[in-house]
Image (cartoon, helix red, strand yellow):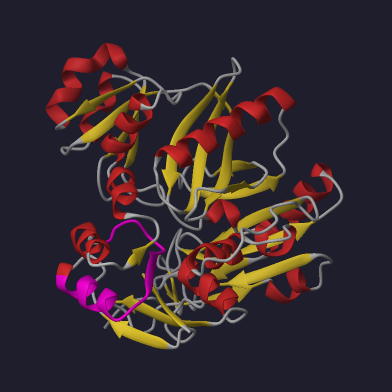
Amino acid sequence: MKKVGILGGGQLGRMLLQEAANFPVDTWVMENDPHCPAAHLCQHFVLGDIRNYDDVYRFGKQLDALTIEIESVNIDALEQLEREGLTVIPRPSALRIIQDKTEQKLFYQQHQLPTAPFVIVQNRAAVNDLLSFLPAVMKIGKGGYDGKGVQVLESAADTGKAFDAPSVLEKKVDIDKELAILVAVDKTGQTAIYPPVEMVFDPYLNLLDYQIAPADIQQKVLWRAEAIALTLAKALQSPGLFAVELFLSRNGDVLVNETAPRVHNSGHHTIEAQVCSQYEMLWRILLDLPLGNTAALHPSCLVNLVGEAGYSGPAAYDGLSEVLKMDAVYVHLYGKAETRPARKMGHITVLGKDRVDLVYKANIIKRTLKVVSGTKENDPGNVKR
């Protein structure tokens, strides 16, 4: 039985392990929190820091294959393990490109992949020399995640919000829709592509609010988006699962936004809505099995469940019973004991007959299901003593 490790024990690792039960595989997880969402679902849990060279190297030495559920891992250790014969998916060379948003942008440019005009800056002071480039979106090179490390700079008045670190300054796009496409690549270079989804983001949290699958786009846009996603995934020269996020501008351009080299929030709906989920697909790649069928079984909507503003502490789920009474609604809670504002706590997948039905149900769920705690942060009675 092949021993496969996962670096990171969050909700993505949790759902990957839930699917692993259907395969002949010995699962290992390394994370620095013994109570992380994935800890109790793996066969072997190792306490360690996924950013530390020695921890990652020692963890990998006992495995047949290794994957990730988050990009912020020690790539030097992965490169050494790969040189010594370990199967690392995605390859460290692909991770090194994607881990740094400045490298990502240069990669798109090198491979003539359409993306918004950009300038790479080394510090906050450099932005003051580029005021004519505004409005722009500034993305910190390393360390950004889930909306963190992104600032919108509309004018010179916003330059104080700029990051004082190497970053990408990207021309602001007049966006009609935000799309995402998952591409699977096996070790022989064969590919499978999932239908695109349409993502709607919370403008305040800069997190996914909900998404619709399949995306409501014209056929020519679909072909263009698929061609870009496939070209990008193949250019990375690595097996794995790649989530390609795209902008559809109001003038009809399809532009690459970012890429994630792993299972992704935009693919959660595939658990119920696709013949082969993104999690099953990654196990097929890791275990040298044929790629799965990406066809949709039903139109679907996914609602992100995040901690309510003003609440921190032991998680409680108001409205859960009401949502569970709804037809064709699937609740996934991530097993996080503590909630805090905007923390990802779960997701809900809705199956329906059309877009109107799906959006209607999604709005009911958003109004009904809330992640709270015992007392609000601004409650005068909630005082630490």
Q: Nearer the viewer, residue 380 or 203?
A: 203
- Image coordinates of residue 317 in percent, x first then y, are 60, 74
- Image coordinates of residue 239 in percent, x first then y, are 45, 53
Residue stretch in magenta = 54-73
Q: Nearer the viewer, residue 331 or 68?
A: 68
In this rendering, is residue 182 above or below 323? above
- Image coordinates of residue 201 in percent, x first then y, are 54, 43
Residue extending furthest toward the top: 132
Q: Does the magenta segment cover residue 62?
A: yes
In this rendering, is residue 109 above or below 298? above
Residue 151 visible: yes
Q: Please report the residue visible at 21 percent of the width from the left and 72 percent of the height from the top.
A: 57
Q: Is residue 56 left or right of residue 3?
A: left
Q: Please report the residue visible at 61 percent of the width from the left and 34 percent of the height from the top.
A: 226
In this rendering, is residue 70 above or below 226? below
Q: Is residue 211 left or right of residue 39?
A: right
Q: Does the magenta segment cover residue 264?
A: no
Q: Please report the residue visible at 50 percent of the width from the left and 41 percent of the height from the top.
A: 244
- Image coordinates of residue 363 in percent, x first then y, are 72, 52
Name which quarter of the figure residue 289 lies in: bottom right
Name which quarter of the figure residue 61 lies in: bottom left
Residue 177 visible: no
Location of the C terminus (image quadrant): bottom left
Q: Is residue 293 left or right of residue 46?
A: right
Q: Report the number of discs.
A: 0
In this rendering, is residue 308 above or below 335? above
Q: Nearer the viewer, residue 95 or 323?
A: 95
